[in-house]
Image: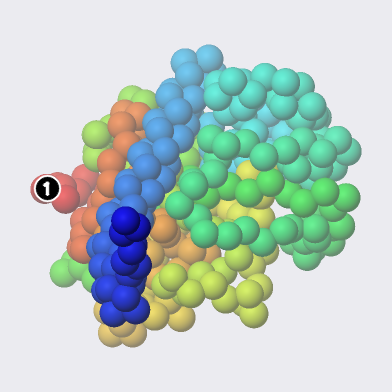
């Protein structure tokens, strides 16, 4: 006797497909959360390495590197335009890249453009969704207009130089910041020692995420129609910025509370802190520790963290 096998009916098949679709729908958010968590952890590890590298530079030279040099100083005896990342290369296991970089020239001259085209994973956050190739640069005195044979390699981390008094003081009951106390630990041509950080190393920011540059973002929307001539690569010494505060749509920075510039981060990535992590961004403090700072932090509190000797009292954040 032969037994007749019975196949699936169309209804049964559709039910199975529907169940699979539901399971996939439930699984995808969990997978995305795992990916986001892994990217955030990798970003944190990069910043920990950079914090250690900055301290190693301090141990060798008696001061932290500036955000960018325009004059002679520790690590820059020739007095050329060089950024803080180039100065940290030997401290992040990039000795060979450092040998390619010529510190007797400005960062855009000679073989330095070849060095600047080499990607360095420690300078890149894996949470960034896409990159824009940089094959040219507009003139930015004393740098001339440039064309690069190979795209400049990017960076997602930048020195926070301090605060802009005119932008931050209107948010305060009493004006606090002046040209004398507005700075953090790494600013133009600075020679800051750990002992100069009188506000405390655990509550003074050195480096923040400024991810995705040179492609301009407004919120999570990429804006290739907007130009950006700063932070065009890890070798660029013109990328660091001071904190201003921005509007919620990222259209303006530094306009004060009356103009709606009350957002601390993740609204615009050119000249303001910006990360691709949900709810905040990573920062490196002057003692070397890395912390995820929520984007709900108040603007005065973040401003207090962005200066080294303004005497603010900072509570929990």
Q: How is the image coloured?
A: rainbow
User: Neighbour class for label 1 at 10 Å: few (<14), some, many (≥20)?
Assistant: few
Does residue 15 sit above or below 163 in this rendering?
below
* Residue at the front extreme of this rendering: 1
Tell me what residue is drawn at x 53 percent, y 35 percent. Answer: 122
* Residue at the bottom extreme of this rendering: 259
* Residue at the top extreme of this rendering: 60
Q: Which of the pair 244/275 is nearer the observer?
A: 275
Tell me what residue is drawn at x 42 percent, y 72 percent. Answer: 219
Quarter assignment of residue 253:
bottom left
The x and y percentages for residue 53 are 49, 25
Residue at numbered disc 1 = 316
Q: Which of the pair 192/259 is nearer the observer?
A: 259
The x and y percentages for residue 4 are 33, 63
Q: Which of the pair 306/277 is nearer the observer?
A: 277
Q: Is residue 107 left or right of residue 227?
A: right
Tell me what residue is drawn at x 76 percent, y 22 percent. Answer: 99
Camera sees residue 175: no
The x and y percentages for residue 215 are 60, 65
The x and y percentages for residue 78 are 76, 29
Camera sees residue 316: yes
Does residue 219 sit above or below 87 in this rendering?
below
Tell me what residue is drawn at x 45 percent, y 52 percent. Answer: 127
Does residue 129 sit above or below 195 in this rendering?
below
């Amino acid at each position: 006797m032969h037994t007749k096998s019975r196949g699936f009916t169309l209804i049964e098949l559709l039910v199975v497909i529907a169940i699979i679709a539901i399971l996939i729908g439930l699984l995808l958010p969990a997978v995305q959360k795992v990916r986001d968590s892994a990217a955030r952890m990798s970003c944190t590890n990069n910043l920990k390495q950079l914090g250690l590298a900055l301290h190693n530079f301090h141990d060798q030279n008696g001061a932290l590197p500036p955000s960018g040099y325009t004059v002679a100083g520790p690590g820059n005896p020739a007095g050329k335009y060089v950024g803080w990342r180039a100065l940290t290369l030997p401290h992040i296991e990039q000795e060979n890249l450092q040998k390619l970089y010529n510190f007797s020239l400005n960062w855009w001259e000679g073989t330095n453009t070849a060095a600047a085209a080499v990607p360095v994973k420690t300078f890149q956050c894996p949470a960034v969704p896409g990159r824009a190739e940089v094959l040219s640069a507009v003139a930015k005195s004393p740098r001339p207009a440039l064309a690069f044979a190979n795209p400049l390699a990017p960076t997602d981390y930048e020195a926070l130089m301090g605060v802009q008094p005119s932008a931050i003081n209107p948010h305060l009951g009493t004006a606090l910041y002046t040209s004398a106390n507005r700075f953090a630990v790494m600013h133009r041509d600075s020679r800051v020692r750990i002992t100069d950080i009188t506000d405390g190393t655990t509550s003074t920011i050195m480096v923040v995420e400024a991810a995705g540059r040179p492609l301009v973002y407004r919120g999570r929307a990429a804006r290739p129609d907007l130009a950006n001539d700063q932070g065009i690569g890890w070798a660029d010494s013109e990328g660091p910025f001071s904190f201003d505060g921005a509007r919620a749509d990222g259209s303006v920075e530094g306009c004060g509370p009356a103009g709606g510039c009350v957002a601390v981060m993740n609204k615009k990535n050119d000249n303001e802190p910006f990360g691709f992590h949900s709810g905040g961004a990573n920062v490196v403090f002057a003692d070397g520790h890395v912390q995820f700072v929520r984007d709900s932090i108040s603007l005065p509190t973040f401003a207090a963290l962005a200066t080294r000797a303004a005497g603010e009292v900072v509570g929990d954040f």
